[in-house]
Image (cartoon, rainbow, N blue to C red):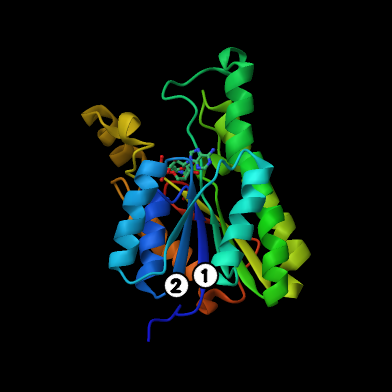
Amino acid sequence: MPELTGKVALITGGSTGIGLATAERFAREGAAVVIADVNDQAGEAALDKLRVLGSEARYVHTDVSKPEDCERMVAETVAALGRLDFAFNNAGISGSDQPLPTADYGLDLWHKVISINLSGVYYCLRAQIPAMLKNGSGAIVNTSSVAGQIAFPGTVGYTAAKHGVVGLTKVVAAEYSAQGIRCNAIGPGFIETPMSQNVLASEQAQQWVQAICPAARTGQPEEIANVVYWLCHPGSSYLTGAYLPVDGGLLA
Ligand code: NAI
């Protein structure tokens, strides 16, 4: 029997990219998977893929920048599938393909990026934790970034949000690990997804990544999904409150 049979995983930003690859990984391991996203069309296509893998998969339209959507996302998950075991809080936006110095960043862009990439994770956490407390166990993984550890000039909102995600992760781990809920953050490097395709498209960008990244290449979404799966697996039972880089050695 697959390892996660009977378990329920909730993945925000699961319609495409890293979230979709992770949804597929959980489905292959036998979990029921709920995708929560604003991209309904891609979400429906993702559902088809998960069902082919044998998962009892659902899609819940969710804008993580709206607290009421996050509450409904968890309520619908528990109503449909009975429980919540794993949460991957991964929905995010880059905000802008162009680097914008802090003084030029713009208030609208700042509020948008913070409301999705930082407040969105908090709204998810405050809805998910009570459901996990009912089980007496749970594993949460939040998507930060290498930008959660170092500064990328021209990305003040994104970098502030991703640093904030690391802080949220540590507080939740400190508060709830004794009650069986582990909480960790991952820090992807340059991963080939719809979000990064414009930035990584040029030969020049690929050469830059090869030069600064010890692995000398970009990463694939599946290489993140494998780590998220392990962070939810009992094999990482004593790991909580950590920031785990998954970046080909970029921060080394
Ligand atoms: P992606 O664009 O393929 O996936 C992001 C998903 O989030 C999309 O399905 C999108 O519809 C969804 N989303 C956007 N706004 C939303 C909202 N308000 N509510 C719910 N869903 C929303 O990009 P990718 O790369 O898979 O991104 C996933 C996460 O990984 C993001 O948090 C991103 O910041 C992070 N990340 C990505 C890196 C990369 O190189 N691709 C590097 C470091 C971090």
| Residue marked by disc 2 | 31
Residue 97's place in the image compared with 162, above or below, is above
Query: Is ligand 1 closer than 8 angstroms to the Cβ of mark 2?
Result: no
Instruction: Name the amino acid type tagged 2.
Output: Ala
- Mark 2 Cα-neighbour bin, 10 Å: few <14, some 14–19, many ≥20: many
The residue under the point 45% across, 59% down is 58
Residue 139's place in the image compared with 39, above or below, is below
Nearest the camera: 215 or 201?
Answer: 201
The N terminus, quarter of image:
bottom left
Which SS class for mark 1? Answer: strand
Quarter-of-image position of residue 197: top left
Q: Is there any visible trace of residue 16 in the rendered image?
A: no
Q: Please state the quadrant of the image where ligand 1 appears.
A: top left
Q: Are marks 2 and 1 in contact (CB under 8 Å)?
A: yes
Residue 77's place in the image compared with 70, above or below, is below
Query: x, y (%) of residue 94?
Result: 47, 32
Q: CA distance from mark 2 to mark 1?
A: 6 Å
Query: x, y (%) of residue 54?
Result: 33, 72
The residue under the point 62% across, 43% down is 120
Instruction: Name the amino acid type tagged 1.
Output: Val
Give whichever of discs 2 and 1 has the lower sequence position: 1
- Judge left or right: residue 103 versus residue 252: right
Q: Residue furthest front?
A: 79
The residue under the point 41% across, 59% down is 22
Quarter-of-image position of residue 236: bottom right
Which SS class for mark 2? Answer: loop
Query: x, y (%) of residue 187?
Result: 50, 50
- Mark 1 Cα-neighbour bin, 10 Å: few <14, some 14–19, many ≥20: many
Tell me the tag on residue 186: none
Tell me the tag on residue 8: 1
Q: Residue furthest left?
A: 203
The residue under the point 59% across, 72% down is 82
